Image: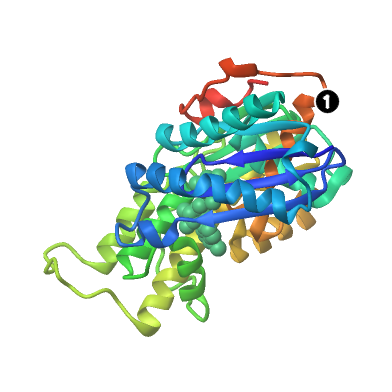
Amino acid sequence: MPILTIETTCDETAAAVISRRREVLSSVVASQEKLHARWRGVVPELASRAHVERIIPVIDEAISRAGVSKADLEAVAVAVRPGLVGSLLVGLSAGKAIAAALGLPIVGYDHILAHLYACRLAHGDALRYPCVGLVASGGHTSLFHVRGPLEAERLGGTIDDAAGEAFDKAASLLGLPYPGGPEIQRAAVGGNPKAHRLPRPLANDRERLDMSFSGLKTALRYLVRPPGAAADTPPPEGRARADLAASFQQAAVETILAKVQLAIDRTGCTAVAVGGGVAANTCLRESLEALGRKRHVQVFIPPPALCTDNAAMGAIAWERLERGDDDGPELDVTPGTDRAAANRR
Ligand code: KG4
Ligand code: ZN
């Protein structure tokens, strides 16, 4: 019998129904992009209110699209960390209410490990452990030594902005809407990635698996609006914008790539699992695949819809349910960070 998975860590309200064989019977994602667009970033209070409005219709839709009824469910699973506390609590409350009403077990799962599990959904057992894990999203950019679906040691990651956050800020500087990642990707088409030499902080540091994106963002800001320029300087357009977008994208991708390479060297792993919204980026995907060919390493990247936030990747909860776990009504959220979240369960 299938399980219901619920995802409300940030600004997507999502639910899915997943069979024990990890088949995605349905996956519904209600995006809040339009709601947050005018603020050019996620406003936590608006996000939790929107989750409250949408969570029940989204769950109902997932159950009905799967062609099952609530009575057919075997368990409920909820992403309980990391994320925005107000958002996490909405998913948890809905999950607990359903589990209590139906007398079902409930388990929490880690959103970051779930991003990596999306590779398992897309590629099945072809993904072997141990492997290097890269999660690059709007809230996180981290590298892991992944020993199993539920076991990952954080090796390093951003020391300031997440990669997706940098894409979002860069888009805003270029006068493009939120979310910025897809916009930068589109704007970069036809642009010259070598037009501007933007910084790749820490990329040449072979000691650390850390990354930094805030200097890149600041460098772009000064190109768009040099010191002394009027605050209302209009954002660049046409060719100038394409070159800036392409140069930014290239720098962000190379920053990530350098550390993936270092993580492969350090761990000796022959596979890399990639997840998170930024993994939807074509330039990053192509660069990672080229790296894999060059280093004879298998690179697993889910299709874009499984990279951005969704509840299908909550299939990871089966790994806990199969060993008999049940968190029961005491289950709680841990907003925290991926530093704290990885390595648990
Ligand atoms: O994983 P995700 O949906 O949510 C979080 O867990 O944060 O990631 C969202 C982030 C946003 O910052 C968005 O701009 C970025 O992923 N993103 C992209 C692309 N599509 C989404 N960044 C670069 N290129 C893309 N094509
Ligand atoms: Zn995410």
How packed is label 1: few (under 14 Cα within 10 Å), some, or many (20 or more)?
few
Secondary structure beneath disc 1? Answer: loop
- Residue 17 point in image, percent of width and height: 73, 45
Q: Is residue 120 left or right of residue 263?
A: right
Q: Amino acid at mark 1?
A: Glu
The foreground one among 215 and 20 is 20
Asked whether residue 131 appears in the rendered view, the answer is yes
Residue lying at the far bottom of the rendered structure = 238
Q: Residue at x 79, y 57 (%)?
A: 293
In the displayed structure image, the side of residue 194 where residue 20 appears, left or right: right
Q: Is residue 276 visible?
A: no
Q: Measured along the vertical axis of the image, is residue 172 above or below residue 192?
A: above
Determine the residue positioned at 62% across, 32% down.
Answer: 98
Quarter of the image containing the C terminus?
top right
Task: Give coordinates of residue 13: x percent, y percent.
Answer: 53, 48
Q: Residue at x 44, y 59 (%)?
A: 33
Q: Most extreme residue toward the top, as rendered?
A: 330
The quarter holding residue 173 reads bottom left
Q: Is mark 1 within 8 Å of ligand 2?
A: no
Q: Is residue 243 left or right of residue 70?
A: left
Point out the image quarter for the N terminus.
Answer: top right
Q: Which residue corresponds to mark 1?
A: 322
Image coordinates for residue 290, horizontal then vertical, percent = 72, 60
